Amino acid sequence: MQIHIFVHMELKIKDITRYLESLAPLSSQESYDNSGLLVGDSSQKVKGILLTLDCTEDIVEEAIRKNLNLIVAHHPIVFKGLKKINGKNYVERTVIKAIKNDVAIYAIHTNLDNYRWGVNFEIGKRIGLKNMSVLQPKVNTLKKLIVFCPSEDKDKVLKAMFGAGAGNIGNYSACSFETEGTGAFLPEEHANPAKGSIGKRESVDEMRLEVIFSHAESAIIEAMKSAHPYEEPAYDIVPLGNENAYEGSGMIGELEKPVETRTFLSDLKKTFGCGVIRHTSLVNKTIRKVAFCGGSGSFLLPQAKAAGADIFITGDFKYHEFFDAEEKIIIADIGHYESEQFTPHLIHDVLKKKFINFAVHLSEVNTNPINYF
């Protein structure tokens, strides 16, 4: 993906959020989630950004103290609808403090989890894995746009669709399939044809253009229509059943070489600063193939086992779920916060590449609600 760098300081909240959503679209978040701009005006000028895993009263206070007016958090402070905002709990108090001080709050949660180079990719990098791929790819997210246009206009139409987000397949962009053919039409009385005349059937050398997309359907169609010379472009949207290998839950990867299991767990504990690692029996003497998921990933254990992983790393495993390892894999619960703690660093690197010479700060507040005795 080509990155256009912003070097000026006149940025608005929507400039930041649109860029983040171009990478991790809101439409890719899970149905229970509440990602997006939760508090604030998208047209407000940004003075600086504070990055955090969770947004709490202390985080808002830190933003105020540092004169930063946009908080980008991984976890949404508001998950459920707020019927009253009177400060009776930490969620309401956090929202009130943010509103009173003109501090905007933006959440980028499961859409960043599902992003191929998002939360889980960052975890894999920290572990030192290679050949990483999505553990549970999403299905029914891909579509194909087929449009017919005059041959001489095909480059203009393709460029518009690519610019709106179509034609990306994995590590490749501007992907399309093109077929020559003949289009025919008869302009009726009230038509305004770009070619031909009213009442006369016209034949035109046309191209059938096919592009794949996963999100931003409305924007892609609008871009296509704006670039198309015809008053009424002929096009089809076709849902695809293909797995989207670049979007989904969890990841799996490999170590450069096998590592003794206890050594691996010791390194894991050090890397993620774990107070403790809860694990099942060490049924494998060495670790090579590693499956993992940031946050609460116990639902992915069947996929980890089916993929032949030696160990599955995540957080929030319940007591009875540990039995599901069935001596076929090692489960390592390193904690929810611990597994996702590097997410703000990921967002920091992404924003600094795009918006250079702009104030992007990592929070100094530890928001982990769990302590270890």
Image: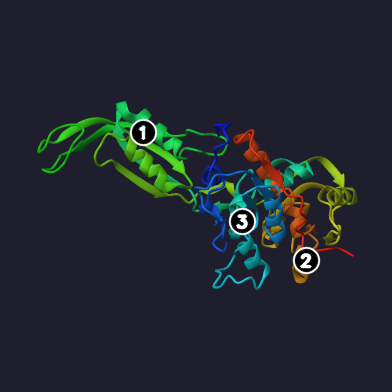
Left or right position of 103 against 256:
left
Q: For residue 220, which quarter of the picture? A: top left
Q: Which is more toward the observer, 20 or 99?
A: 99
Of the numbered discs 3 and 2, the one sitting upstream in the chain is 3
Q: Are marks 1 and 2 in contact (CB under 8 Å)?
A: no
Q: From the top left corner, tell me how far across and down residue 5 is, in percent.
A: 57, 32
Quadrant of the frame with the N terminus = top right
Amino acid carrying mark 1 in the image: Val
Amino acid carrying mark 2 in the image: Phe
Residue denoted by label 2: 322
User: What colouring method underlies this structural image?
Assistant: rainbow
Mark whose residue sits in front, 3 or 1? 3
Q: From the top left corner, tell me how far across and down residue 371 is, in percent.
A: 83, 63
* Alpha-carbon span between mark 1 and mark 2: 53 Å
Q: Is residue 221 above or below residue 4?
A: below
Mark identifier at residue 169: none
Q: From the top left corner, tell me how far across and down residue 355 is, in percent.
A: 60, 36
* Residue shown at 58% from the left, 54% from the top: 102
Residue denoted by label 3: 101
Left or right position of 303 against 165:
right
Mark identifier at residue 157: 1
Q: Is residue 294 above or below residue 354?
A: below
Look at the numbered disc 3 and give the secondary structure of its residue.
loop
Question: Dot 3, how many residues are within 10 Å of its Cα: few (below 14), some (14-19), or many (20+)?
Answer: few
Mark whose residue sits in front, 1 or 2? 1
Is residue 312 visible in this depiction of the protein?
Answer: no
Q: Which is more toward the observer, 165 or 135?
A: 165
Amino acid carrying mark 3 in the image: Asn
* Alpha-carbon span between mark 3 and mark 1: 46 Å
Of the numbered discs 1 and 2, the one sitting upstream in the chain is 1
* Alpha-carbon span between mark 3 and mark 2: 45 Å
Q: Are marks 3 and 1 in contact (CB under 8 Å)?
A: no
